[in-house]
Amino acid sequence: MRPNVRAPDSYDYAVIRVVPRVERGEFINVGVIVSCEKTGYLKAVIEPDDARLRALDPGIDLDTLRRHLDAIQRICEGGPDAGPIGLLPQRARFHWLTAKRSAIIQTSAVHMGRCGDMDAIVEHLMDRMVRIAPE
C-alpha cells in the first residue's frame, strides 16, 4: 500500500525587476512573487542589491524604491493595511501585481510550475533568478 503522498500543486510566479531608467530598458531582478490558487498562497520575497542598482543609476532614490517594494509584500499579505488592492481576493492581487507596466518597478511574464513546498520554491527562485552566486 502506498503512503498518503500529496500531489504537487500548480503555482505561478513572476520575477520583480527594478528598471531605474525606463528609457534604457536595463533592469536588476530584485525579487519574486509566487502564487498558488489552490492553497491560497501568495508571497513576495524582495532583496534589492543597492550597489547593482546604483551601477545602473547613481541617482536612484533607494528609500522611495524600498517603500514601493514593501507595498508589494503588503499586497501579497492582504488586508486593509495594503489599501484597496489588499482587500481583493488572493488571485486578483497576484494579477494586479503582475500586470504590465512602464514604470521603475516591473515584473517578468508569469511562469508556472508544480511543487509541494511553496516556501522552498520561493527560495529556489530567489537563488536562481535574483541572488548572485558566491564565487
Image (tube, grey):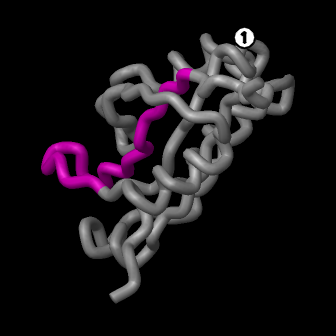
Q: Name which quarter of the figure residue 131 lies in.
A: bottom left
Residue sitting farthest toward the front:
1
**Which is more toward the observer, 104 or 49?**
49
Q: Name which quarter of the figure residue 129 lies in.
A: bottom left
x and y percentages locating residue 69 in the rendered image = 57, 48
Q: Is residue 15 above or below residue 113?
A: below
Element marked by disc 1:
loop
Q: Is residue 107 above or below residue 45?
A: above
**Which is more toward the observer, 132 or 100?**
132
The magenta stretch is 10-27
User: How crowded is the residue under tag 1: few (<14 C-alpha within 10 Å), some, or many (20+)?
Assistant: few
At 67% across and 41% down in the image, what residue appears? Answer: 117
x and y percentages locating residue 19 in the rendered image = 30, 50
Q: Amino acid at mark 1?
A: Pro
x and y percentages locating residue 47 in the rendered image = 54, 62
At 72% across and 11% down in the image, what residue appears? Answer: 88
Judged left or right of residue 72, residue 103 is: left
Judged left or right of residue 135, residue 3 is: right
Q: Is residue 58 above or below residue 17?
A: below
Q: Which residue is mark 1?
A: 89
At 39% across and 36% down in the image, what residue appears? Answer: 107
At 28% across and 67% down in the image, what residue appears? Answer: 57
